[in-house]
Amino acid sequence: MISLKINQKQYDVDVNPDMPLLWVLRDVLQMPGTKYGCGVASCGACTVHLNGDAVRSCVTKISRAANQEVVTIEGLSPNGDHPLQKAWLEADVPQCGYCQSGQIMSAAVLLREKPDPTDQDIDDAMNGNLCRCGTYLLIRKAIHLAADMQKQGAKI
Amino acid sequence: MKNVKSPLSKAFVIVISLILFIGMSAFLLEPASSTTGNEYLGYKAKDSAASVKAFADVYRVLMSPRCMNCHPAGEVPLQGDDSHIHQMLPKRGKDGNGIYAMKCKNCHQPSNTPGLNTPPGNPKWALPPADMKMVFEGKSARELAQQILDIKRNGHKTKEMLIEHARDTLVKAAWDMGEGRKPPPLTYSQFVKAWDTWINTGGYAPRK
């Protein structure tokens, strides 16, 4: 049995310790917000936070997450009102939407560590998250927007 | 006007030339630590030939993709057997662990991820830090030997620490880098032997 803390809730799962965190989230705990993209840590669709870092859950064994703090897109904010989520809506970022939860989870780390990022900071932080619809410019716009919201006191 | 040289003056020129050549050779085969010489290594006994020969093997390993890829000249690591720029362009960051959402350990796990084209792993996975980049890429054998034995450029390693460094688990991981990656050109034990020999015989830098 492996103990997990995901989105502030405690879970015990009986799975192979080598199972990727992504499979536990999606198939065992029924949290489908985190997406499977490439399976080899090359696209970023599966990004979640592990102790605050934007790990690729498709290659992160569940044993690494045991008793650690995991946050998924479902837990980024209680009511979907994280500045990034609001900015994403305002900038109308998604097209197909498949990569967007991973994009937002990576952007959340950027804004925490660099509250007022430049375009270069955004590129440096987001290079590992691919978007086949090519929404990169909208993503950049939304991150700047979220940074502004954050400066104005929105909770992050 | 005739240009006449006596046998005596010819001999003088030859002797001077020999002295200059020997003097220059001494500089070309100096111990790798250019600032403190062998005092740094704590050795009085020297064997420059054995030392330089051993470093030739060390250099082949250090310049192989398994070592050089994480000792890049730029801010982005290299990747693959052809040492191309790492996809996704992850940057070194101040401490060598990457930046923002692009930290090394976000993808590189404590152990290798199974399968082809998956991230190799190690608990220590990182680049050298920004204030001590320890670049291998593009260095000649002479330049790299001098860098490794310069305590101001080698991660502040003493002789003992350098000897120990060859036994480091991250160094050893170069020989177990996951599926589809070519190992360094020597075996791990051959590398350690060459490394020790290079240092213990005086840490000489090759001429080039």
Image (cartoon, coloured by chain):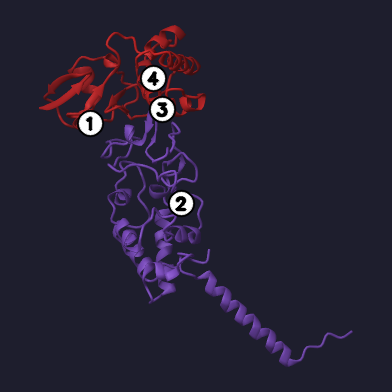
Disc 2 to disc 3, how far (Cα)?
Answer: 25 Å
**As rendered, which of B165 and A15 lies closer to the eye?**
B165
CB under 8 Å between discs 2 and 1: no
Q: Which mark is residue A103?
A: 4
Same chain under badges 3 and 4? The reply is yes
Direction from residue A63 to residue B4 in the image, left or right = right
**As rendered, which of B149 and B52 lies closer to the eye?**
B149
Disc 4 to disc 2, how far (Cα)?
Answer: 34 Å
Residue bearing the label numbered 3:
A128
Direction from residue A57 to residue A130 in the image, left or right = right
Q: Which chain is purple?
A: B
Q: Which chain is red?
A: A
Residue that appears at 34% across and 29% down: A41
Task: State the residue lying farthest toward the right.
Answer: B1
Say which chain tag 4 marks: A
Residue that appears at 18% across and 32% down: A63
**Which quarter of the figure has residue A47?**
top left
Say which chain tag 3 marks: A
